[in-house]
Amino acid sequence: MSISLKKGMSFNLSKKEPSLQKAMVGLGWEIRSEGGTLDLDVSVFMLTANKKLLSDEYFVFYNNLKSPDGALQHTGDNRSGNDDDDDEIVLVNLSKIHPDIIEILFVVSIHDAETRRHHFGLLDDAYIRIVDVDSKREILRYDLDNEFGGSTDVEFGKLYRENGEWHFAAIGNGSKKGLQGYVDIYA
């Protein structure tokens, strides 16, 4: 049975799922009828202890689908958000993550949000979930609240390494930084 997390909660993957090596991180949302067409993008920042990217190649997104260590693979940009299941997927191999990486942050931003006047208030049922690739079993899920009306981007969650163990934290922080704003912070 899948664990349902609330904002601010964390889950120790290494202790509670010791056999987990390959995970699918699925992110999804539903566009409200008044939302029209929105292009949401999942971006992943692989961060070191100083909260910076190890190198630019450790920023995984629609123009860089794979990390240089082979640990992360973004399966591609879904520009419509019309899937019944996960709208975008990132595959993670925990055993391949570069040893200097201690945090993997999952951010969803709305492409061209300012110009088009798009925001997360035009969405429902946003979530992030982790599935064991080998068993196809959903381990955990975080359903975000509908509290991001003016936000153009949201930090859904993060994987982080603490004392050699991998954890997942449900974040749910919205902002108007935009994708470039995040790049400026972490590059």
Image (cartoon, rainbow, N blue to C red):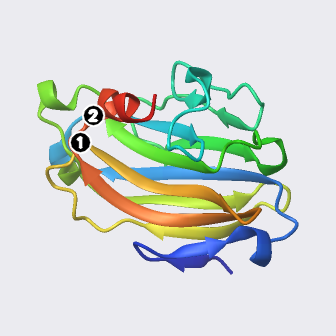
The label on residue 178 is 2
**Residue 119 in picture, x, y percent from top left:** 19, 44
User: Distance from label 2 to label 1 (Cα)?
Assistant: 6 Å
Instruction: Residue at 51% x, 37% y: name it.
Output: 52
The answer to whether one can see residue 32 in this image is no
Q: Earlier in the sequence, mark 2 or mark 1?
A: 1
Q: Which quarter of the image is occupied by the N terminus?
A: bottom right
The answer to whether one can see residue 60 in this image is yes
Q: Is residue 60 above or below residue 99?
A: above
**Residue 26 in picture, x, y percent from top left:** 57, 51
Instruction: Residue at 48% x, 68% y: name it.
Output: 142
Label 1 sits on residue? 152
Instruction: Residue at 32% x, 26% y: name it.
Output: 180
Circles 2 and 1: CB atoms closer than 8 Å: yes
Q: Quadrant of residue 146?
A: bottom left
Q: Quadrant of residue 40?
A: top left
Circle 2 Cα neighbour tier, 10 Å, few/some/many (<14 / 14–19 / ≥20): many
- Amino acid type at circle 1 is Thr
Q: Is residue 2 above or below residue 108?
A: below
Mark 2 or mark 1, whichever is nearer to me: 2
Judged from the image, the secondary structure of the residue bearing numbered disc 2 is: helix
Judged from the image, the secondary structure of the residue bearing numbered disc 1 is: loop
**Residue 131 in picture, x, y percent from top left:** 69, 60
Q: Is residue 124 above or below residue 89?
A: below
